Image (tube, coloured by chain):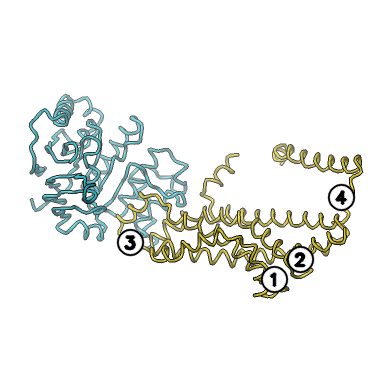
């Protein structure tokens, strides 16, 4: 434990140092609250509005997780189909790539219109569309970038396509899939909050931040940003933990073991 | 030659089409008797790996026919008559050593108890008992290649096809694995076709060395190597061993007039 403390000490010092400098700078230069509230005010706002912040954070996280699941499952299904059938690849891949160039966020008002501005589903759909492409393309890469030797080996055993899929392609794709989900965890929270900016329930991070900022209660807005960051990091770490358990054989886990 | 395990007749292999046509193999005739250890040796790009892959039905001849155990190579592959070992071990990172050895048995739907028992027996054969639960990346290169050999033998294939299996290993490991391979060959009675670019390795291991020409590859001669069995470290110091090395080397250099067409392995 003490070894771990020694390892993390520099990062902790930097964190504390930056907060201290921030506090000092705000006081020394008399920076206005609405420009940059000092950490102490943000901490105060955090304590004062703790229950509400937990509620809005949870609501936004629900949208992000829901959207990631919807978009993730759809992406996996499409990637499996494209990897399996060349026709599916020719039919779907061009649209998937074209869709990736569309600034998805621009669809947020449309999604609000389709799925209800107050319904979390409208935010989930924005997130789903946002995470679809990175997960789909990474999964596809993992399914198709398979060592030729492995495929020949399976052929020499007269393995069926199904056996090659389950025993070679899928395990090969798992690290790619997890990488995509880790990236998408952060992306899903960004998507949910930005979608909320376009209108939605008051009880969610995006609307909370907008409202508090509109009333010049910037410390509250900052406290909500802290919540958003903590939720985002926690989401990432949860997926990381699942990855460690699911694919302990992967290089990333090996490096972690030796350090 | 009814006891031939592999019979290659009049095989040509051409890669590409139209103006990009590259003839890789020409007029290949080869018979491999049951229990033989045949090495294919030749300069880089002579098509020795291609010939091995043709026998294993991983690619198909442009002309000619290949019979294995009295059936087509394709049928033989579907019947799981082949064990393959490549230059790279091609082990799956996500499987333990035991899991890797069990892979072909899983594909052929053997039940769990049989798989586990076979895998343990094969790992004992390659002297890796105690490493069952390790992952491939925790083993040295030589050990990984031994796992690959255990895996290839796990379903008792009639023929073991080996494509420069020890090519990436250091000399010491290579010599030790050569001895191990000979022991395994004796113990299992498997017919082995072995691609190598090392003349001493080919002579040391084989009952027959098939010397191939540069592209397009032809079999120049099949030299029977009747050094005494079992071979061991003393074999490498035998004068006749050097004699065979010299003969293979001279044949590779083309000192003799190339003799196209039939080159038949005499029954050993």
Residue lying at 36% horizontally and 31% vertically, measured from the top left: B170
Chain A's colour is: yellow
Q: Position of residue A146 (x, y in %)?
A: 41, 52
Are discs 3 and 1 less than 8 Å apart at CB? Answer: no
Front-lying residue, B209 or B217: B217
Looking at the rendered structure, which numbered label has been put on residue A37? Answer: 4
Q: Quadrant of residue B242?
A: top left
From mark 4 to mark 1, how far is it between C-alphas?
31 Å
Looking at the rendered structure, which numbered label has been put on residue B108? Answer: 3
Chain B's colour is: cyan
In the rendered view, does A144 fall on the left or right side of B33? right
Q: Is A155 above or below relative to B179?
A: below
Front-lying residue, A120 or A175: A120
Residue lying at 27% horizontally and 44% vertically, measured from the top left: B162
In the rendered view, does B168 fall on the left or right side of B226? right
Looking at the rendered structure, which numbered label has been put on residue A204? Answer: 2
Q: Secondary structure at mark 2?
A: loop
Q: Secondary structure at mark 1?
A: helix
Q: Position of residue A26 (x, y in %)?
A: 88, 43
Q: Secondary structure at mark 3?
A: loop
Q: Secondary structure at mark 4?
A: loop
- Give the chain of mark 1: A
Are discs 2 and 1 less than 8 Å apart at CB? Answer: yes
């Amino acid at each position: 434990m003490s070894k771990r403390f020694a390892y993390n000490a520099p990062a902790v010092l930097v964190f504390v140092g930056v907060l201290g400098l921030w506090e000092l700078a705000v006081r020394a230069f008399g920076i206005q609250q609405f420009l940059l509230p000092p950490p102490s005010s943000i901490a105060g706002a955090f304590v004062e509005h703790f229950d509400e912040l937990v509620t809005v954070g949870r609501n936004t996280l629900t949208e992000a997780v829901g959207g990631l699941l919807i978009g993730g499952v759809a992406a996996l299904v499409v990637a499996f189909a494209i990897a399996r059938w060349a026709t599916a690849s020719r039919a779907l891949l061009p649209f998937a790539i074209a869709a990736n160039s569309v600034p998805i966020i621009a669809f947020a008002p449309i999604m609000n219109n389709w799925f209800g501005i107050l319904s979390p589903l409208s935010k989930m759909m924005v997130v789903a569309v946002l995470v679809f492409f990175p997960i789909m393309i990474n999964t596809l890469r993992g399914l198709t970038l398979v060592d030729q030797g492995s495929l020949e080996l399976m052929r020499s055993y007269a393995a069926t396509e199904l056996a090659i899929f389950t025993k070679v392609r899928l395990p090969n794709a798992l690290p790619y899939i997890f990488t995509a989900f880790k990236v998408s965890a952060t992306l899903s929270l960004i998507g949910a909050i930005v979608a909320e900016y376009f209108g939605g329930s008051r009880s969610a991070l995006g609307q909370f931040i907008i409202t508090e900022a509109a009333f010049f209660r910037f410390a509250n807005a900052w406290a909500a940003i802290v919540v958003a960051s903590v939720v985002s990091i926690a989401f990432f770490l949860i997926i990381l933990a699942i990855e460690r358990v699911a694919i302990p054989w992967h290089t990333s886990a090996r490096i972690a073991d030796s350090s | 030659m009814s006891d031939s395990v592999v019979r290659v007749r009049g095989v040509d292999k051409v890669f590409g089409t139209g103006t990009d046509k590259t003839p890789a193999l020409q007029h290949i005739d080869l018979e491999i008797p049951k229990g033989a250890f045949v090495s294919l040796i030749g300069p880089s790009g002579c098509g020795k790996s291609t010939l091995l892959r043709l026998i294993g039905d991983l690619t198909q001849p442009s002309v000619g026919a290949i019979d294995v155990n009295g059936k087509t190579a394709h049928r033989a592959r579907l019947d799981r008559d082949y064990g393959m070992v490549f230059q790279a071990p091609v082990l799956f990172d996500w499987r333990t050593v035991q899991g890797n050895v069990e892979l072909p048995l899983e594909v052929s739907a053997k039940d769990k108890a049989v798989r586990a028992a076979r895998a343990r027996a094969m790992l004992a054969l390659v002297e890796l008992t105690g490493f069952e639960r390790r992952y491939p990346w925790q083993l040295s290169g030589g050990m990984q290649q031994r796992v690959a050999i255990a895996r290839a033998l796990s379903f008792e294939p009639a023929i073991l096809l080996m494509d420069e299996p020890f090519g990436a290993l250091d000399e010491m490991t290579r010599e030790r694995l050569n001895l191990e391979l000979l022991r395994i060959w004796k113990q299992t009675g498997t017919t082995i076709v072995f691609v190598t670019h090392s003349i001493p390795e080919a002579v040391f291991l084989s009952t027959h060395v098939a010397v191939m020409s540069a592209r397009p590859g032809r079999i120049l001669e099949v030299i029977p190597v009747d050094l005494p069995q079992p071979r061991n470290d003393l074999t490498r110091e035998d004068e006749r061993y050097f004699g065979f090395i010299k003969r293979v080397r001279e044949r590779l250099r083309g000192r003799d007039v190339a003799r196209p067409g039939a080159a038949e392995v005499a029954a050993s």
